[in-house]
Image: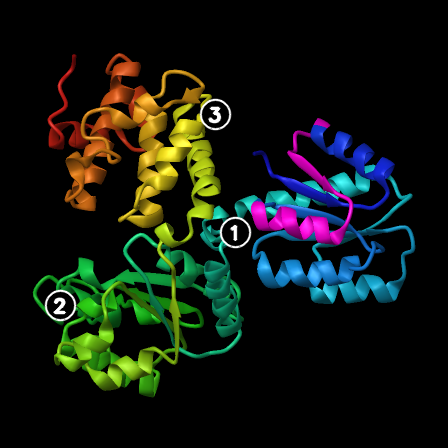
Amino acid sequence: MNNPILIVEDEKDFALGLKEILELEGYSVTVSYSAEEALVQLSKNLYDLVLTDLMLGKMDGITLLKTIKDNHYGTKVILMTAYATVENAVKAMKIGAASYYVKGNPIESLIDDIKTILKANNSITSANSPMIKTLNKDYQNAINMAIKAAKTPVNILLIGESGAGKEVFANLIHDESERSDKPFVAVNCQALSESVLESELFGHKKGAYTGATEERIGRFEAADGGTLFLDEIADLPLSIQVKLLRVIETRSIERLGSNTNIPVDFRLITATNRPLKDMVARGHFREDFYYRINTVEIAIPPLRQRKEDIRPLAEHFVKIASDQMHKPVHTITDEVWEHLLAYDFKGNVRELKNIMERLVVFSDEEIITAEHLFLKNDILTNNVDDQPLKDFRNALEKRYITSLLEKNQFNVTKTADVLKITRRQLQNKIKMYDIEKR
């Protein structure tokens, strides 16, 4: 779907005329003739934009606007009316309307507003992408909780399985906070050794340790005024937990090799896929640190608990992959949807993204069929039930690169250009994956 739009209008002729105009502009348009009917549509489908008349039936446009803002994050709303008043316009904008259109004015002004709003929506960070839109009530509740917490300075702990979207939520909280125009700095605590992590977080003076050839600021200083996101917080060594506890309490850090206190102003968001309470009970995680980081705790539901989001997410990933690979894939058969909806996504949204990319790689036509699901080592077979996600990603990347190289007659320069990497990076991957010219 190309920027799906929902028109809510009880004047049928005006609604159908506007629908025809917007479809000529390339948008996918649905019409509802009442607010109640619109809410049914919104419960079944994701829309980037809703155009609603102010004066409807039992439920007016203002009430519908409030409901959309509370339950459909990321969906923009334009109010339309033939009876424009300053009071209504101000009220609508305060509630969160993206714009206000007076019927009778040139329709081009409405189309210009729509283009501007959707262009901005498409260029926003991941926090406002289809990754954060949902048809699931529990997921929407988590979004609402995150938005409310974002308006405060409290520390937030995100709980969720690997691949469920914890960093997406962290971005959402940052974007909805007063710090949105300041830096968002993310650190994966699992990916760094204790010594490297300490330097990454606090920075170091020149000569602080062997190899410290120049002074360097840490992530806390980089996030000054903004948000620091510590992912995989359960992997923090106890020694660093002690130091972080002090930083949270004093709002100051000392670079390695220095005794000078440096004030830092940051919003702390942490995330984990492990049970921290159990780790505290076993002595593997500090209790005082645990209570410091989770003033607000938000649980993110796994993908298998929000099956209704699989289809829009899959379509989104297919569109991105087909654009990147210059392949006109735009249709997925019903049989494929049946398999996807029945599958238990252990890797959550990240796994779904990998699967859809893989299907686009191996689709030779504009349609993805069930036969693409059952190639050797496909994630939807039983052959890789216990395969680590890293191994699957590597296998997927190898198949993708091999496919592109074959498509481009092993022209490394052309293939690297498609992949948006350098020739040297591609040559390193060819060597790492032992890809041979066939």
The local crowd at label 1, few if under 14, some if 14 to 19, many if 20 or more residues have their Cα within 10 Å, is many
Quadrant location, the N terminus: top right
Residue 432 x/y as whole percent: 12, 32
Reading the chain from its start, which is encountered first: label 2 or label 1? 1
In the image, which disc is placed on residue 331?
A: 3
Q: Is residue 33 left or right of residue 13?
A: left
Q: Residues within 10 Å of mark 3 (few under 14, many from 20)?
A: few
Q: CA distance from mark 2 to mark 1?
A: 41 Å
157 relative position to 110: left or right: left
| Residue 328: percent from left, percent from top | 46, 21
Q: Is residue 22 left or right of residue 436?
A: right
Badge number at residue 101: none
Residue for point 64% across, 34% down? 28
Q: Amino acid at mark 1?
A: Leu
Indicate the quadrant containing the C terminus: top left, top right, bottom left or bottom right: top left
Name the spot of residue 196 as percent of width and height, x first: 15, 64
User: Which residues fall within the magenta stretch?
Assistant: 24-44
**Disc 2 residue type (three-letter):** Glu
Residue 166 visible in image: yes
- Is label 3 or label 2 in front? 3
Residue situated in front as seen by the camera: 146 or 122: 146
Residue pictured at 38% horizontal, 59% vertical: 301
Q: Which mark is residue 135?
A: 1
> Circle 2 sits in a helix, a strand or a loop, which is it?
helix
Residue labelled with disc 2: 194
